[in-house]
Amino acid sequence: MVPRTVAPNSFAGRLDDPAANAGYEAPPPRKGFFTDTSVCIGCKACEVACKEWNMVPEDGIDLLGMSYDNTGGLGADSWRAVAFIEQSRPIGRGTPAFDGTTTGGSSDALQQDVVAAGIDVFEEASRLGTALPGGTPIADAAAAATGASGGCGCGSGGGGCGSAPAAAAATTTTAAPASEQFLGMPGMLAPAPLPDREGRQDVRWLMMSNVCKHCTHAACLDVCPTGALFRTEFGTVVVQQDVCNGCGYCVSACPYGVIDKREGDGRAWKCTLCYDRLGNDETPACAKACPTESIQYGDLDELRERAEARRQQLHDVGVTEARLYGEDPDDGVGGDGAFFLLLDEPEVYGLPPDPVVTTRDLPSMYKHMAVAAGAMVLGALVSGLGRRS
Amino acid sequence: MNTPGSPTEGAFERDPHPDADPRRTQNQEPHPAHQGGQSHHDPLGGQAARMWGAGMGRRDGAAVDAPGGPDGGKPRRRGGRRRRGDPNAVVPDAEFRSYYGRPVLKRPVWTHDIAYYLFSGGLAAGSSMLALVADARGDATARRNLRLTSLTAVGASAYFLIIDLGKPERFYNMLRVAKVTSPMSVGTWILTGFGPLCGAAAVFEGAVLLPQRGVWGLARTLARPAASVAGAGAALFAPLLATYTAVLFADTAVPSWHEPYRELPFVFAGSALASGAGAGMLLSPVAQAVPARRAAVLGATLELVAAHRMENEHGLVSEPFRIGRPGKFLRAARALTAAGAVGAVLGRRSRVVSAAAGACLLTGSFLTRMAVFEAGITSVEDPKYVVVPQRERVAARDAAAATASA
């Protein structure tokens, strides 16, 4: 019980070292996640690894009927949850050229180029991978290679185009040896057109492994009335399950809808950023299991630099919709310990576009409460005025 | 293919061969596997186009009808947007995007017990303040009944708070810390101060049952001043007890609880005063209910004015206070509270009118609390209350930045 002066920006605003602000002396560097959704393949290895390591119970085998995401989002029993979005967008600004004719719309023709050219999507993906600079849109390569060969590029990637007429007659001789990239997954080809030469496409899949953001200003931690939630020396936010009494305040306070009460248990549960592993200098389970380095773990400062470089790299190759989410230490929650690179607006992934820690307004709330309480006292005094009749 | 009445038809049904024929184009004959009610809407083959047809992931608005759909051509109510309200409204429903229409925030896990607690806590606070007034004025019946009401209400409050916990047997963990950043912790300590004082004041009222002589007589004599001291102490905590709950609700991410954080303490303060006054009017003879009637008018006015602002000043986030269950509750609460205030003025001589007005005020206060509780739930169940105001905030910030740099 050593009284400490409350540093400015303890409730909101920029705060560079939340662990030191919480009272740790010389804490280790702040740890976090950078989740690069541009390389997420939706394999859910993170979900499984998280459940295994943290012994998170099964959360209902449901078919949600909306997309390939049947987890549905984060919760007490889903500390990692892979969002899956299938987007369909009209090609260009209007109807494709030649649409309605027997040759079909132009987009379809361009799409076929990719298949016919034997483009190996894994090869192309690896050129744009998590670390390598440079790279070209798949469609450019397709355009360059069309006519040069008739190979089936996705032969190594599984059955993605196995039933296509072009592929059926093709050999695999021209496909680049891609055994290093082969992940044993089904084909990468979406059941829909690939990007055309200008990067436009009819359908795309967005995948994002969502997780607790470990906010710099964590509302769940602020409002917890038992002190069960605490800030660790790594700057993360963890629930002490032997203290939590299940009041549920954190559930309503979280601006991301992450933490929840576990059915039948009554206490609040969420990602701990594998606090037990961190203490042993181990990588959290989800990052360890991620096969595409979509989930990257490390010192937050370094991750922020890496993320900005990645965003720039994607912009350089024409993926101008790439944007970082939660990396800004000046945002409404003081920046997230776990932040993301997204390919669309945050709300498309189920994330709030501009979250603000509710505690930011707490001083004003208490002021209004004081005035209202004063009004009550005044009301009671006025009521009691005058002599008894 | 279409099962009438099945809500998940269409978007849910999987194409057996989603990528069977990538060369298939929009104007070619549909693949045999795709011959069905939706094949001409489904040029890509598979779930994507169906979800697109159902309006998912689209920026520009209304869902496209799937012909032969189970609902006979009515717009689907799936996807990111739902149309509701007045079809002739001038202002169109807000357009926004979302993750398949799923909520962004978690639904509060608090049950209706917490709404009941808002009422019982307010009643305990309001009646203990009016008990102090009655004590000062020497209105013995009013004082006794208000103290007993207060004790009953605070007992009910503790009960509702504890059974709503996920681990009720750990309720005492609330007492291991005192945290200003947690209104629940602040409230715990307010209740810890208020409860015993309120209880003592009410229990000492029982001293009239003791014999007048001997040791018991001494206790009986001391009980009166002791009750006054305890009652005054309770009345000191009471305004905090009545208003901290507003901060408790406002200090969340729930849009319709957080945004009206300036009005909510006044709504709850007025409601608490009105309910305490209602109890006073219901349980006291008219001669002793003068302060209660005044407090009824003051409390009801404060509640109605603040609730009106809460209901109208916050754009989209005010909407849950006007629609559905919370809207019904709030309209009923307004009518009852206004009726109670009028009855308080008219009921100067009639015990019946006075008591009826008191009952109106109590019910009105209860429904106000229910409305606030339910409005918050409504505002997290539909992602638009989270996404649209935040989008507007971002847009305003971007516009300001653009102006500044220009």
Image: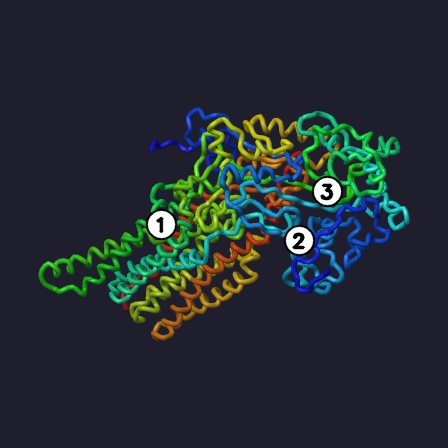
**Which residue is tagged 2?**
B79
Residue drawn at 37 percent across, 65 percent down: B278
Element at badge 3? strand
Instruction: Using a 10 Å C-alpha cutoff, classify the residue at mark 3 as few (fewer than 14 neighbours), some (14 to 19) or many (20 or more).
Output: some
Q: Is residue B14 left or right of residue A234?
A: right
Q: Looking at the image, which is closer to me, A171 or A191?
A: A171
User: In which quarter of the view is residue B67 placed?
Assistant: bottom right
Q: CA distance from mark 2 to mark 3?
A: 17 Å
Specify the farthest residue to the left.
Answer: B214
Q: Is the Cβ of the residue at disc 2 closer than 8 Å to that at disc 3?
A: no
**Which residue is tagged 1?**
B169
Q: Position of residue A261 (x, y in %)?
A: 47, 48
Residue drawn at 83 percent across, 47 percent down: B24
Residue B91, visible in the rendered structure: no
Instruction: Using a 10 Å C-alpha cutoff, classify the residue at mark 1 as few (fewer than 14 neighbours), some (14 to 19) or many (20 or more).
Output: few
Q: Is residue B193 left or right of residue A345?
A: left
Residue type pointed to by label 3: Arg
Residue A389, visible in the rendered structure: yes
Element at badge 1? helix
- Tell which tag, 1 or 2, sits nearer the viewer: 1
Protein chain holding label 1? B
Protein chain holding label 3? A
**Which residue is tagged 3?**
A204
User: Looking at the image, is mark 1 or mark 2 earlier in the sequence?
Assistant: 2
Element at badge 2? loop
Protein chain holding label 2? B
